[in-house]
Structures are given as C-alpha cells and as structure tokens.
Image (cartoon, rainbow, N blue to C red):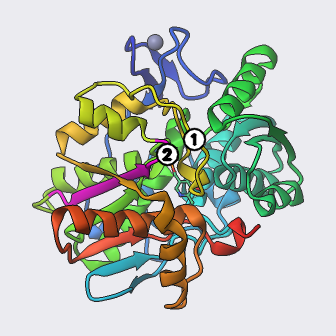
Amino acid sequence: MEYVCTKCGARVDVATMQPACSCGGLFELDFEPPVWKDSRIHRETWSQFRYRDFMALDGNTWERVSMGEGLTPIIPFDENVLFKMDYMMPTLSFKDRGAATLVAHMVAIGVKKCVQDSSGNAGNSVAAYCAKAGIECEIFVPEGTSPKKIDMIRAHGAKCHVVEGSRDHCADVCRSKVREEGAYYANHVYNPFFYEGMKCYIYETFEQLHRIPSNIVIPLGNGTLFIGAVKALEHLEKSGVICHFPNIIAYQSELCDPIYQAVKEGLEVPAKVKAQPTLAEGIAIGEPMRGAEILDMIRRHNIKVVTSPEDRIMEARLAIARRGIYCEHTTAANYAAYLKYCELYGPTPDTLITMCGAGLKSDH
Ligand SMILES: Cc1ncc(COP(=O)(O)O)c(C=O)c1O
Ligand SMILES: [Zn+2]
C-alpha cells in the first residue's frame, strides 16, 4: 500500500517512518474501499474491525491491539436528537477508533517508539494502545490540559510533557522532536491510518439504524472525525446505499474558529486567528494542518459551520447531565452548537450528535 502526497503527488510506501512528504505535504492513502455491502460486515467481530473490508489495514495486526473499540450505542436524547455514545470506549473517548487503527499499522511496520501531541484525548488513546502493543510512547500536551487526562497517559506508562503555551505551540514542540530525533510521529492529524478508524463512526451508525440521520453534528478542531465521517459518507453514497448526503453541522469554538472564519471570508485555507483559551480544550486548534482539505469538503457538500457559544457550554453540560449523561466540556459544546444552529436555521429534527468524551476526564 502507498501514501500519496497531497501537495506534490509523490508516492511513498506506507512502511515509511517519515511523518510527511519531503516537500512538506501531508500524506493520504491510495486506497479505494470496495462497494459497501452489508454482507461484508464481519458480524462475529465485536469491535469496529467488523468493517475491516472497507478499511485500509496492513494485515491482521489489529487483532493484537484491539480492545473492543467502537460498537457504541445510539440513544434518543429528546424528540429531535440522537446521541451516539462514543465515549463508551476503552479510554473514554472517540479517539480510540483512530488510535487502534494507527497503532495496528505501527505494529505492522515495526515501530518501537513514538511521539504524539494532543489536547489530551488522542494522546490518551495512543498511549493506551501503545501500552497494549508494547511500543514506547511520549506524549506532549499543552498547559491547562485536564489533569485526569495527564494521569491516564502516565498510567499507561507513557512519558507526558506538559508544554507551556497554546495547543498549536505544543504541536510545534513535538514536531521539532520528530525532525531532530527522527522519532515516529503517531499523530492523529498527520497519519492517514487514523482516519480509517474514524470512518467507522458512520459505518456503525448505518448498520445500527439501517439509514443515516438527516443531520449530523461534528466537532471541528483538527477534524479527524469530520474527515473520517465525510470519507465514509462519500463511500456509502458512491456504493448507492444512501441517496442523500446528510446535512453536516460542523462546529468550532467561538474563541478559536479558523475554519468558520475562512468559510465566512470565502478562503481556501484556514483564516489566521488568535486562539483564546476555551473550555472546549479539544477543539482549541488555531492552525488545523488539514484545513484546506476540510474546506474543500465543506464546499463539496455544502456543510454548515457554526460556532459554539462559550457561555452556553456549562449550561449544555448540565442539561445533558440532568438526563443522565455526563460528558466532557468539549462534548457539551457539541450540544450548545446544535442549539445555536436551531436558533439560526429553525427546528432541526433527526439529528445525530456525538458524545465523544466522558465527563470525568474534564473535571478539575
Ligand atoms: C472531546 C473532544 N471533542 C472533539 C475533539 C476534536 O477532534 P478533532 O481535533 O479531531 O476535530 C477532540 C480532540 O481531541 C476531543 O478531545
Ligand atoms: Zn510532496
């Protein structure tokens, strides 16, 4: 299997230890999944790897790292909203979908040691799956990251560095380590295998409901779920099993909104913004590396981008908790963004919202 550079088109074997093309462009996988058929779901596999026929995987290494990720319930929240309970995963966040798939690839190509930067959840997932796979791991998180996420990373045996400054600066510090020391960059934004796992969010929804809801709310930080979901929906549409692309409602924090501003200004790359601290730590990304790719998808599918009001996040978290679900702040921002969308565009029934991080992770 090969990567293709999104900038210069160079082809590189996926066994490469380089995080990106020598021209600086990010990789994507040269992989076209076969036409979707329900009969190709491996129903005896109780994890997202039941969709393995539609995922780019190198061999069966997923069997060695899988901890039953995926297969999360979809439950009604009210008459308009369904929640997909994606924090019901081994490390209590949706990033396990991508991390399991990425670490399976790392096992396949013989990685022994890796580094990663994260707002906490992706780092947690990579640390846990590396622990399972016996890969040494070092995680960089920005200051202010929820202490419970840091505790979890360390519990898995990974080194965790807390870097002063913004989330974007933390990524820069980690990337200079990758450049200087040649460490393997187990990163959810750079590595295309991560998205192969995120695609399963949609495959699973389709298997569970036998349809795709009319509206899907997706957070947009670096856009790993966003990109994975769009890819999977394009696959289902191309396979002829869905005839309408759903209305995707992507949201950013109103305090860090480079994609929202780019859409407003008609830009093809993320707008330059000054990221301010937000309760929604998971989406505090001022410079999304795949921003141009995301904006292209937004134009292609007429995707709506809204901002989540900071002063409504705690209110939303409480409203959700009062109905029995305790989610993290960034996840409450999903619901706050949905309510904002309803204010702007009117009642929006048949909406799927992801509950992607557990509440106990952001209690501090
Ligand atoms: C709880 C939560 N929600 C949303 C996101 C945003 O995901 P992405 O950066 O892939 O868009 C994150 C990222 O870490 C997160 O932890
Ligand atoms: Zn290139």
- Tag shown at residue 276: 1
- Relative placement, left or right, of 273 versus 167 is left
Tell me if the residue at label 2 has its CB under 8 Å from ligand 1.
no
Crowd rating for badge 1 (residues with CA inside 10 Å; few <14, some 14–19, many 20+):
some
13 falls in the magenta region: no
Q: Whole-percent x and y of residue 164? A: 79, 35
Image position of 317 with respect to 96: above or below: below
Along the line of sight, the residue nearer the viewer: 223 or 112: 223
Q: Whole-percent x and y of residue 8? A: 39, 11
Residue tagged 2: 255
Name the quadrant of the C terminus: bottom right
Element carrying mark 2: loop
Callout count: 2
Can residue 253 be seen here? yes
In terms of image quadrants, where is residue 148? bottom right
Q: Whole-percent x and y of residue 256? A: 49, 42
- Relative placement, left or right, of 98 versus 139 is left
N-terminal label among 1 and 2: 2
For image coordinates 55% across by 32% down, the residue present is 190
Residue type of the residue flagged with mark 2: Leu
Label 1 with label 2: CB-CB less than 8 Å: yes
Rounded to the nearest angstrom, the CA distance separating label 1 from label 2 is 5 Å
Can residue 48 be seen here? no
Element carrying mark 1: loop
